Image (spheres, grey):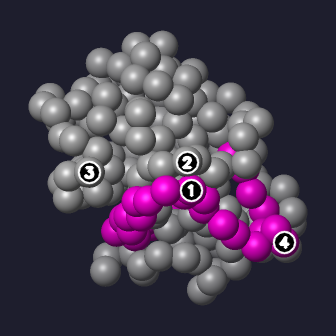
Amino acid sequence: MTTTLCSETTVFPAVVTDVVRRAVENTLSSMGIQNVRGQPCSNDGSISGGVVGIISFLGDICWTFSVILPEATAPVLINKFTGFEIPFDSPDMGDVVGELANVVAGEIVAKLEAQKIKVQMSLPVIARGHDVEVMTSVAKPQARLEFQSEAGVFWCKLVGAKAGQCLGRTPGT
């Protein structure tokens, strides 16, 4: 029997928050980014300008993962990820942020499966602009993590959903 862990709660599952923090820290550390530290977020998740990669998860837990990179952090972090410079305003920036979100999401899936939690992930959706904020219903369980690193500060936002109500694309599409 499948249990949906966050269908009727206002608290985002701590197991997922911990897995996301570890997956982001591990993925960025493996890219050579030093001193990656995740902590609960004091920011509301809005930034003056940036790019956001969004992936939905369906399965035992239905939720959406967003990685939010401010304009100052994105080129530095993406340079470490790709090994070459990509200007923030380049059309390639969105593609690479989507791929970074995809890599982190793969690590999240592996860590959740190790804990016997089954999920599938969607393809990434990307947004870029000024005064960027990932807005969600306040009734949904949420968690925000802030990450400090040598590349700069960035955030992850996690938002729970009932099965069939996840944002983004269905896994495999």
Amino acid found under the numbered disc labelled 3: Asp
State the residue at coordinates (48%, 49%). 49
Residue where numbered disc 1 is placed: 131
Q: Nearer the viewer, mark 4 or mark 1?
A: 1
In magenta segment, residue 92: no
Where residue 47 sits in the image (x, y, percent)? 58, 47
Instruction: Name the element at disc 2.
Output: strand
Q: Is residue 136 magenta?
A: yes
**Magenta-highlighted residues:** 117-144
- At x 20%, y 58%, the residue is 91
Which residue is disc 3 drawn over? 89
- First in sequence: mark 1 vs mark 2: 2
For the point 60% across and 61% down, the residue is 134
Q: Quadrant of residue 74?
A: top left
Of the two numbered discs 2 and 4 in the rendering, the one whose residue sits closer to the viewer: 2
**Alpha-carbon distance for marks 1 and 3?**
15 Å
